[in-house]
Amino acid sequence: MIEVCNAGKTYRQGTREVRALRNVSLDIGRGEFLSIMGPSGSGKSTLLNLIGGLDQPTTGEIFIDGRPLHGIPDDELTLIRRRSIGFVFQFFNLLPILTAVENVSLPLLLEGIPLAKIRPQAFQLLERVGLGERAGHRPEQLSGGEMQRVAIARALINDPAVLLADEPTGNLDSHTSEEIFTLLASLNEKGQTIVMVTHDRRAAAYGTRIVTLKDGALSEDISLGVDAT
Amino acid sequence: MNLANLLRHISARHIKYQKAQTFLALAGICLGVAAIVSIGIVNKSVLRSFEDSISVATGRAALQITGSQSGFPETIVEKVQDVPGVEYAVPVIETDGLLSRGKERSIMVLGVDVLIDSQMRSYSLSNESADIPDPLLFLARPDSILITKAMAEREGIALEQRIQVETVLGTRTFRVRGILNPEGPAKAMGGNLAVMDIYAAQMAFGKEGRVDRVDVSLMRGEELETVRQRILSVLPMGYTVETPVGRTRQIEAMLSKFQTGLNLISIFAIVVGMYLIYNAVSISIVHRRKEIGILRALGAKRKEIMRLFMGETLVISIIASVLGVGLGILFAHSIVGTLGRIISQWYARTTVTGISVPWFYPATGIACGIAASLVAAAFPVHAGSLISPISAIRSLPWSDEGFFTGRRLKIAAAFFLLLSATVFCIYKFAGFLPLFRNKTFLFSSQIFLLLGISLLTPAFLKGFLSLFHRLPTTRLGSMGMLAGLNLRKNITRNAVAVAAIFFGISVFVNSAGFVYSLKESVMTWLDAVIRADIIISDGHPSSSTNAQTIPMPVDMWREIEKVPGVLSADPWRKVYMDYKGRRVLLSVVDLIRRGEYSHFMVVRGSDREIRRLLPRQDNVVVSEPFAAQFGVRAGDVITLPTPSGVVRFGVVAVVVDYLYDGGTVSMDLNTYQRHWGDMLADQFSVRVRAGENIAAVRESIQERLGTDRKLYVLPAQEFKDEIRKVIDQTFMFNYALSAITMIIACFGIIITLLASVLERTREIGVLRSIGMLRKQVSGVVLIESVLMGMAGGILGSCAGIMTGWITLEGASYSSLVQYCVPYGSIVWAMVMSVGLSALAGLYPASRAAKTNIVEALTYE
């Protein structure tokens, strides 16, 4: 479903060139829960950004359901993100001016669908993540775990092909983290493809497969289950 | 901590990284200062040109005697010469002429007594004719004329050449007998001056036996005031004996209303600049909150933090003000000619050859720029100094409302609105006490009103956004919703940007409403009084009011009536005179002939009484401003100075008359000629026989009478249209100043939106990551700017209507002037505020659209 072929990414840092990713090749199947691990600076987030179409590889190619994510116009790439990819960030990244239900609705609002039409679906998703009663609250009125659950609900509103999570519990306590991982695992059980970046071995174990990056290159690829199709 | 160190190492770095914001704040203040400086300089330059012309044309005269504009008997000269202490009493004709050669050029004609004028003024001829001892001897022949070197060079006129000059008798040919060096009187009016023998000038300009002025020099050791009193005692009432400086002051007083208006409007530009600085400093403090926290943690005192930000403001305001002075001088150069033309058209003829830059105006501009910036910055700086180190470093929530909390704003707004109403009531009902009854006092009422309303801007913006949230968001979808919510997030800051637009728009709508109402009233009045089909005048229709022109012989009506198709022609004469130390207009009509088809717009009295009591009798009607100024009512008797002495006139009625806002007295032609001995006319109203083609009759008049003189023969409608245009032109500077104010306001929008985009970097990153297109991101920012423009436009239009009404109340032209809402201009104001705001939003929108997603997601 997701194909990463010899992807490389080089950044300029002042006059210095930093090779964040070196010739990484990876195939991710539908229904997989892939955990990407590695020490700080190993290129985990860079790989996730490339898979999510947030950034473009310097070398190599990336495909999602056979469609290239490289070398296409920005608008096209944006629409792929909007319709096929769901994002969950470490710092939740909810819009403080919107309520929980409005935050969840945002990707569909961008499609031009009136809020009234989206609201029931958004509400359903909030109930699914256990926040049905907090729908009208603003981010500042929610706890960290609640905010992350809203972010997960937002990532799911478009029924994305893949859900990408970058250190989703990096800002949460251990108890709340457990809840979030359980939620992600249950979503995966229902067939949702998930790619998660983490540096926590226990968290990675919620996945069905773990790949490890070291100095921008793939160093290990371990399969933990057989959910992938 | 050392302020210089902080400024050098911290502030300089911020300026480097926030070039756009710094530039905009600087440009705003720079433009505000430029507006103040340019208007100040231009006003002063116009006055200086009058002053120079008077002083160089005056020569050694210590006193000048003037009477009615139509002149006074030359026998007065002998009387004055006989006054003890008077050395020379020299008669002068000072009138307008038109050089018909090449491009028509209006010139001042000085008619002097060739035998004694050199005792008063020195003339020097250019080299080719310098061997004659007294240049005035050239003028012994009646067709001789001297012109200035500047005019000769400009028009390509050589010595002994014949030139044609438009006179009262028509176009006459004169021989150039000498070319004057640019010394003495030859420097007056930018060199647009010709000198003739007084006798020839009297003949040519219809002033036989009369003079316009007597210049007086004193014997050595005589005291000026004593001689002045002696002269006054031998003159009939109505004569003015003034020093040349005093004459300049008279002109200054005449122009003061017009010039004060411009000065006051230019102040708006700096007020809007204050809003800009307030926002720029507030934003800077919000962005540098963490830095303030760190500095405080490292031991910087509150006072030092305040000094740092005030120091930055001071440096920027000094640079901006100095640049503003330079820009103001440039502006002044480009507009001085136009302003000179407008003043020549409406007040008195002048030629402004250059600008004079006295230190006062640049100094005032710099002081205003710096003071306005520091005052505007003081509030946010004070709020910033209260930031606690812990909250800043930990990024705890902090309100940037600072001093201006919602409650305080409402109390301050109520205070200013009340103050405005009180000031207006005092103005309206405090009679005619000079302390209260002046334009500056009324202007303060308008400023308080605008301040009050601007303090209500946050509340208004909140309401406006809720309304917007309910109404069109469904159409604009996610972009509209986000834009509305973003604006609500920083309501105080956005309200300041809206308030700046509101100020700009209110100045525009104020001027537009005032001009529109006045124009409507003037046009209604013109429709009532101008019932003729064709108007023949000696100058452009605008000369119906103040500017001097070359009048026509009153008997010309006989010639006009001989033109086929003409039913009747009757003359009108306008003359200015002094009444109780003030300049008033004497408007003269042939009431017997004109009364058949035209009438006055009567306020007190009746038209029947006017028809019965005015023709051939010593009765007059007065305009409302005259009645109000001098406390005159219908039935009173007023004493008017005439060239032959003081005459008592009965006031039959008070009428509407917009000819001169200083006051008009109207009388019958026969009465005027009897007392003034003046046989000239400025205009003829012509009625065309029924069934005749007006255009054809106009052509015939032009053919028959227009060959020998410059005539404006216009169908009545065209004449009125020209007046309408001239009224618009007169207020063009008001519109130009509104435009400058709006540009400054737009800088405010750019600064606000740029700050908002910067603060929302991470948000924009998130939106882009979940699929928001670049054009949608820029769309949100553009909608925000348009919403701010709309809110400012609506509020500004409402405030403009109120201030326009107050301006009109203060103008006191007539009780019949009704305020008319300028709907057309309000539509323009909305288009302008929304359009300019959208334009201002383009740059921040494009910056937002270019946000790099990955960097934005890690932005703190």
Image: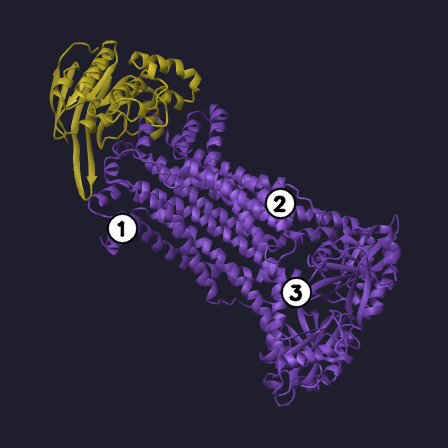
Q: Give the purple chain's letter.
A: B
Camera-nearest residue between B40 and B698: B40
Q: Please give the label number shown on residue B304.
A: 1
Q: Please give the label number shown on residue B348.
A: 3
Q: Please give the label number shown on residue B805.
A: 2
Q: Kindly indicate whether the residue at mark 3 contacts the one at mark 2 (C-beta within 8 angstroms).
A: no
Label 1 vs label 3, nearer the camera: 1
What type is the residue that disc 2 sits on?
A: Trp
Using the image, name the chain to which the residue with label 1 belongs: B
Q: Residues within 10 Å of mark 1 (few under 14, many from 20)?
A: some
Alpha carbon separation for disc pair 2 and 3: 29 Å
Q: Residues within 10 Å of mark 3 (few under 14, many from 20)?
A: some
Question: What color is chain A drawn in?
Answer: yellow
Residue A93, quarter of picture: top left
What type is the residue that disc 1 sits on?
A: Glu
* Above or below for B650 versus B135: above
* Above or below for B746 versus A155: below
